[in-house]
Amino acid sequence: MATEQWKQVDDYFTSKLQAQDDATDYVLEANQEAGLPAIDVSANQGKLLYLLAKMRGAKNILEIGTLGGFSSIWMARALPADGKLITLEYDEKHAQVAEQNIEKAGLGDKVDIMVGAALDTLPKVEQQGHTNFDFIFIDADKVNSPNYVQWALKLCTPGAVIIADNVVRNGRVIDPHSEDEGIVATRDLMDMMSREDRIESTAIQTVGSKGYDGFLIGVVKS
Ligand code: SAH
Ligand code: DHB
Ligand code: MG
């Protein structure tokens, strides 16, 4: 019941605040056609990522977990003409669908997709000299989110924004006895953040078309 109402409110805000958006509508259709799971950020979460990237004045964005490129497209739209987004994806098929979607959205020149397990591609990102990310979105395999935050700290500039998706999961994050490895890792992530004095952070619970979940949001100290 609540979920249905949350979805209707999301749809209402989206209809008022996000003009008809053929590019992102197309992505969701193409993803469905290709059989990708519908676990993209919601339309208004996408717009939120775009707004946060704009507020930060982001020029170099790193994303971990591309899927079909829905969130990549939202963030890349916030980039200036000379801005770049690198997105890391394990699944070759997801990366192929994303590449087509991103091209179709007219953002092919701004976005690079690197295929492979992110813990293997992150060292390559570093070797290629990309150590100046000012906005990082972590949304891949939740078990590695703590590792990805450590990589984010290694590859970012002072003042960078770091965001991690799915830190609430219907409230299951508060269960200290959870045997779900994603929940255990999210709790490890929170323990890490509570000790991490290089980042100021908070976590925000959200409801909407994706149910009850939330973002971890941090800013790296200057
Ligand atoms: N950010 C996307 C959704 C990502 S879903 C959006 O909002 O549109 C999570 C993605 O992470 C999936 O495509 C999955 O294949 C990918 N993934 C899972 N494990 C990974 C890993 N070890 N390295 C990189 N990507 C991974
Ligand atoms: C799942 C993954 C996500 O990144 C998300 O936002 C929602 C669900 C999942 O793996 O189920
Ligand atoms: Mg997610």
Image (spheres, rainbow, N blue to C red):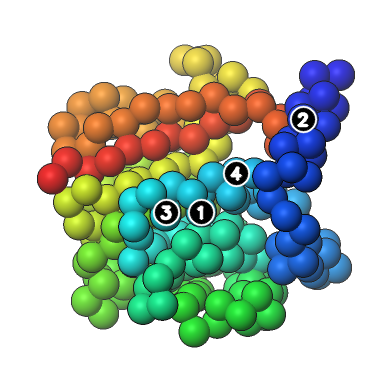
Locate residue 49 relative to residue 36 in the image: left or right: left
Three-letter code for the amino acid on which mark 4 is drawn? Gln
Label located before the other in sequence (4 or 1): 4
Disc marking residue 53: 3
Q: Residues within 10 Å of mark 3 (few under 14, many from 20)?
A: many
Q: Residues within 10 Å of mark 4 (few under 14, many from 20)?
A: some
Split into quadrants, the picture shows ligand 1 in the one at bottom right
Disc marking residue 20: none
Ligand 1 within 8 Å of disc 4? The answer is yes
Q: CA distance from mark 4 to mark 3?
A: 12 Å
Label located before the other in sequence (2 or 1): 2
Foreground mark, 4 or 1? Answer: 1
**Which residue has dot 4 on it?**
45
Q: Are marks 3 and 1 in contact (CB under 8 Å)?
A: yes
Q: Quadrant of residue 197?
A: top left
Q: CA distance from mark 2 to mark 3?
A: 24 Å
Residue 85 in sight: yes
Q: CA distance from mark 2 to mark 4?
A: 13 Å
Number of numbered labels in the structure image? 4
